[in-house]
Image (cartoon, rainbow, N blue to C red):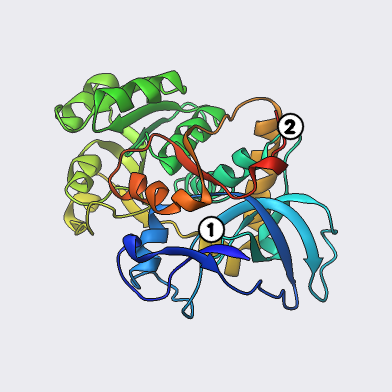
Amino acid sequence: MQALICRNWGDIDTLELGEMPSPVPGSGQVLLDIVATSANYADAIMVAGNYQTKPELPFAPGLEGAGLVVKLGDGVENLKIGDPVMAKLAHGGFAEQAVAEAGETWPLFDGMSFADGAAFAVAYLSAHVALRWQGRLESGETLLVLGAAGGSGMAAVEIGKAMGARVIGAASSEEKLQAILQHGADHAVNYSTDNMKERVLELTGGEGADVCFDPVGGDLFDSALSSLGWGGRHIHFGFVAGVPRVPANRLLVKHRSAVGSSLRYFQSLRPDLLEQSMAELREAYGRGAFDPVISHRMPLEKGVEALRLLTERKAVGKVVVEVAPGNEIKK
């Protein structure tokens, strides 16, 4: 099969298009013909050898994908051959075929294209479990989303609105702010030029936000924490700008909390909550609450360019790589 192959740990520029054997599904797994995958910042971290899991070389990156089930491993009963699905992958999305765990593979929602499925599985599910179970976001609360023009950020904006929250999206450019507002945010803050704490307090009448969804980290963590009101919950979702230090004293004085959110936790220890999140996402998608933003669609041979759009922070929403675009389901 054709794949974008990582043969040695390093920069994404070392990836090369080539042939590699098709994977074989084991017990509880399925083999997918990949139609579309999407680029994630974590793909570049994995290629560098710095991700939380380290595949055996050589491998194809790609942490999510959508396509058709073509083979079932032993014990798989929730899917059948020919099903159009989306899946969270250990790796392998940047290839014509990939293996997925049956428990992390879901039928495409009614009316969902393969491209939307590829943009949905990781970003929306990760954002939903973060907001629903870690942030305990309630209807009527105020949600501050950092990196709101990115894939997970845009998902968090939409999910926050679907849950009845007032959403303040924060990003680094006017172009991104316009995209955030067009996609449903109530307000937008430019954290490159504005004092984020002052703007959030101004927009909330001095109360501060109730929940912050933070996939950025770095220096923004401090101002995000200061933007929270009494009892505010900060969800640490990523650290593309660096790993912040948590000032415990500032959590204490305003009864705030800072929590991490890892999809792997829900997969391993709370699959019941994971399935409930997916059911709630399905229902919201069915009533038109979600419309994944795909800023770029690129063929597999331009997979490195797709990843570079993420690492250089030039994408708005998701970047989808169309592995077999001729099989695409049209909306």
Residue 149 location, x and y as percent? 37, 34
The answer to whether 331 appears left or right of 233 in the picture is: right
* Precedes in sequence: disc 1 or disc 2: 1
The answer to whether 207 appears left or right of 133 in the picture is: left
Q: Residue at x 30, y 42 (%)?
A: 313
Quadrant location of the N terminus in the rendered image = bottom right
Amino acid type of the residue tagged 1 in the rendering: Phe
**Camera-side mark, 1 or 2:** 1
Residue behind mark 2: 111
Residue 298 in view, yes or no:
yes
Residue 314 location, x and y as percent? 31, 38
Q: Quadrant of residue 199?
A: top left
The number of numbered badges drawn on the structure is 2
Identify which residue, 236 or 38, lies in the foreground.
38
Q: Secondary structure at mark 1?
A: loop
Q: Residues within 10 Å of mark 2 (few under 14, many from 20)?
A: few
Residue 215 location, x and y as percent? 35, 48
Residue behind mark 1: 94
The answer to whether 196 appears left or right of 209 in the picture is: left
Amino acid type of the residue tagged 2 in the rendering: Gly
Q: Are marks 1 and 2 in contact (CB under 8 Å)?
A: no
Identify which residue, 242 or 251, lies in the foreground.
242
